[in-house]
């Protein structure tokens, strides 16, 4: 197929390409679909004949204000104010929580919609692949698709990290030392693989 398996490479004229076998396509698609289910619906689409200005005012401030309870959703939709920093030493924690709730109310719906669009772009581009006789295919990403994929890969890694209850600082110390019989091993392998995809895709850009 002329491309290194498991790595994104730059396309001449812009974009990126990767050779994927049937199992890799299936895993990526399954993960993206699970991400869509986790994220849930974004903001509803306005009616075709709706007044844009009226829609803007109607939707303003209509997002959720409460922090999600699912650790994965907390990683995907973190608080804007995680805690008092040097500039907020005199700010009451309740005030910081109120600021976070207000920020979430105005931004989370749009962020949720964007994350859904990124995950949908992954599913649709995988569905459009035409495998060769051995079940492998070359995925080519052009236009906005490389950035869509980057967003989805990042969200997938955040989600898996939450399920594994790890932070980036713990990654090398914890993940690479798991024994083969550890039940987390398959998820860890997926996490590391997605990290490699993300890294090589960034390099092509």
Image (spheres, helix red, strand yellow):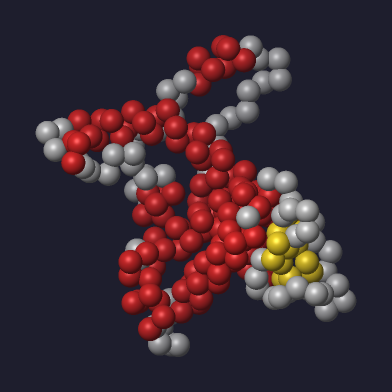
Farthest residue in the left direction?
90
Q: In this view, does 162 lie to the left or right of 39?
A: left
Residue 162, image quadrant: bottom left
**Could you tell me residue 68's position as x and y percent?**
36, 44
Farthest residue in the bottom direction?
180
Is residue 43 placed above or below 191 in the rendered structure?
Answer: above
Q: In this view, does 144 lie to the left or right of 38?
A: right
Q: In which quarter of the image is the C terminus?
A: bottom right
Q: Can residue 42 be seen in this view?
A: yes
Is residue 191 placed above or below 61 in the rendered structure?
Answer: below
Farthest residue in the right direction?
133
Is residue 84 placed above or below 134 in the rendered structure?
Answer: above
**Could you tell me residue 150's position as x and y percent?**
58, 54
Residue at image position (36%, 31%) is 103
**Could you tell me residue 51's position as x and y percent?**
63, 12
Residue at image position (45%, 58%) is 158
**Could you tell me residue 145's position as x and y percent?**
68, 49
Q: Is residue 33 visible?
A: no
Residue at image position (87%, 76%) is 133
Depth check: give the residue in front, 116 or 199: 199
Depth check: give the residue in front, 4 or 178: 4
Residue 175, image quadrant: bottom left
Q: In this view, does 6 lie to the left or right of 166?
A: right
Q: Is residue 109 left or right of residue 13?
A: left
Residue at image position (75%, 73%) is 3
Is residue 114 placed above or below 194 in the rendered structure?
Answer: above
């Amino acid at each position: 197929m002329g491309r290194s398996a498991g790595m994104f490479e730059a396309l001449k004229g812009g974009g990126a390409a990767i050779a994927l076998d049937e199992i890799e396509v299936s895993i990526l698609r399954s993960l993206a679909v699970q991400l869509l289910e986790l994220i849930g619906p974004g903001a509803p689409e306005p009616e075709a004949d709706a007044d844009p200005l009226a829609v803007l005012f109607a939707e303003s401030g209509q997002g959720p204000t409460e922090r999600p309870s699912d650790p994965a959703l907390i990683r995907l939709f973190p608080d804007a104010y995680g805690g008092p920093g040097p500039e907020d030493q005199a700010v009451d924690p309740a005030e910081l929580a109120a600021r976070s709730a207000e920020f979430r109310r105005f931004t989370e719906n749009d962020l949720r919609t964007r994350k859904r669009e990124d995950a949908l772009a992954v599913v649709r581009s995988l569905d459009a692949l035409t495998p060769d006789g051995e079940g492998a295919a070359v995925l080519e990403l052009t236009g906005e698709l490389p950035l869509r994929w980057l967003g989805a890969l990042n969200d997938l890694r955040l989600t898996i990290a939450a399920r594994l209850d790890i932070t980036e600082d713990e990654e090398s110390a914890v993940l690479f030392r798991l024994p083969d019989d550890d039940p987390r091993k398959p998820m860890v392998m997926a996490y590391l693989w997605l990290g490699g995809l993300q890294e090589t895709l960034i390099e092509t850009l």
